[in-house]
Image (cartoon, helix red, strand yellow):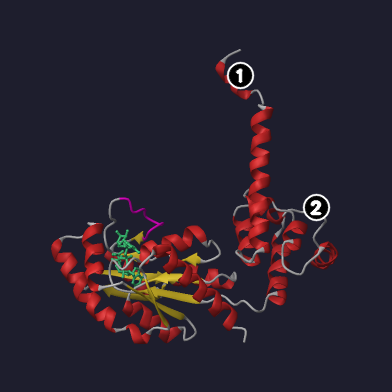
Amino acid sequence: MSAGERSAVPDPAAAGRAAIEARRARAAVKRALAAGERGPRDVAERAWQEPGGPEGRLRVAEYLTSLRGIGPARAASVMESLGIAGSKRLGGLGGLQRERVRGWLDDVDPSRRPRLIVLAGPTAVGKGTVAQYVREHFPQIRHSVSATTRSPRPGEIDGVHYAFVSDADFDRMIEEDDFLEWAKVHNQSRYGTPRSSVQAALDEGSSVLLEIDLQGARQVRESFPDAVLLFLAPPSWDELVRRLVGRGTETEDERERRLETAKVELASQPEFDATIVNTDVAEAAREVVERILAAEADEAR
Ligand SMILES: Nc1ncnc2c1ncn2[C@@H]1O[C@H](COP(=O)(O)OP(=O)(O)OP(=O)(O)O)[C@@H](O)[C@H]1O
Ligand SMILES: Nc1nc2c(ncn2[C@@H]2O[C@H](COP(=O)(O)O)[C@@H](O)[C@H]2O)c(=O)[nH]1
């Protein structure tokens, strides 16, 4: 038997392990739903983005009975009213069924409304680090990927950290009204929040976190008066400088320019809805998420 033929032979032990792993992942999703750590909208949208993932492989009946206050009988009647067959998996729902589930979620969960959240603060305070922690630990919150005319730093990926665009492209995007807000930051490069992806996430019921500068925060306040503006502050000025120098991604000139902007940004704190001091990344991220959840709940009152 050749090596190729050997690798084609099914390995029941490996298949069994994969099935156990998949069951565990689905159980973790159900636990998170039951504990309220993940929202029903987030799980459903994730299932439709990745029908083969743990959310997508979850049966609709299991999904529903993981929600607080819904037992097997209520789940069966909800599925009947939405025209969903008993054994259907969440990821296997068609377009019409997905729309019906979205509508049902709007009706049963009116207490949560998605919000636009701004996370601003001086250079190197840790906005990116805290946002990354939120991304990894609180997947129900979406993040906007900005466009920028600055060059990528080592390790930055186009489309993940930023959409890196030319000046001409940025001009065209402004002309076509693609930005919800944009600004020239540190008097250097331009940065902008794409309107369409943010609106799509809000329409799907997810809050969206924008990690932007003070000028952008002011524009958001103007066009979205119910946006929540969070200011991330350093424990001290010296610590801010230490973080900027320690990051090692800017030249001396660039650092000075950024620290000049930082003084203006620090003075703007009273314009924000809340200040969160970033002493510890996990703590600061938790506080950001608590503010978001409180704002989502507040909307309904
Ligand atoms: N709580 C913290 N304690 C110690 N170091 C931190 C903390 N938060 C972030 N840092 C470090 O500070 C540096 C700057 O963080 P980060 O790049 O996230 O800042 P930023 O606010 O996004 O900056 P900029 O606005 O310039 O893009 C990084 O080296 C990061 O690891
Ligand atoms: N107004 C906007 N500001 C933005 C946006 N995306 C990022 N930023 C801010 O720019 C500075 C510098 O970022 P860096 O990655 O070059 O260090 C920082 O304060 C960001 O928050 C945006 O879309 N709009």
Query: Extreme top residue here?
Result: 1
Instruction: Compute the Cα span from label 1 to label 2.
Output: 36 Å
Q: Amino acid at mark 1?
A: Glu
Q: Is residue 249 visible?
A: no
Magenta stretch: includes residue 159: yes
The one nearer the camera, 266 or 89, is 266
Element marked by disc 2: loop
First to last magenta residue range: 155-162
Q: Amino acid at mark 2?
A: Ser
Residue 5 numbered tag: 1
Q: Is residue 273 left or right of residue 106?
A: left
Identify the residue shown where x is 53% and y is 72%: 207
Q: Quadrant of ligand 1?
A: bottom left
Q: Position of residue 253 (x, y in %)?
A: 13, 65
Q: Is residue 92 left or right of residue 246?
A: right
Magenta stretch: includes residue 57: no
Identify the residue shown where x is 37% and y is 55%: 158
Residue contact between numbered discs 1 and 2, judged by CB atoms under 8 Å? no
Among numbered discs 1 and 2, the one appearing first in the sequence:
1
Q: Is 268 placed above or below 247 here?
A: below
Find residue 48 and report its image quarter. bottom right
Q: Is residue 160 left or right of residue 62?
A: left
Residue 234 numbered tag: none
Q: Residues within 10 Å of mark 1 (few under 14, many from 20)?
A: few
Identify the residue shown where x is 72% and y is 64%: 96
Identify the residue shown where x is 68% and y is 75%: 109
Location of mark 2 (residue): 87
Q: Quadrant of the N terminus?
A: top right
Q: Quadrant of the C terminus?
A: bottom right
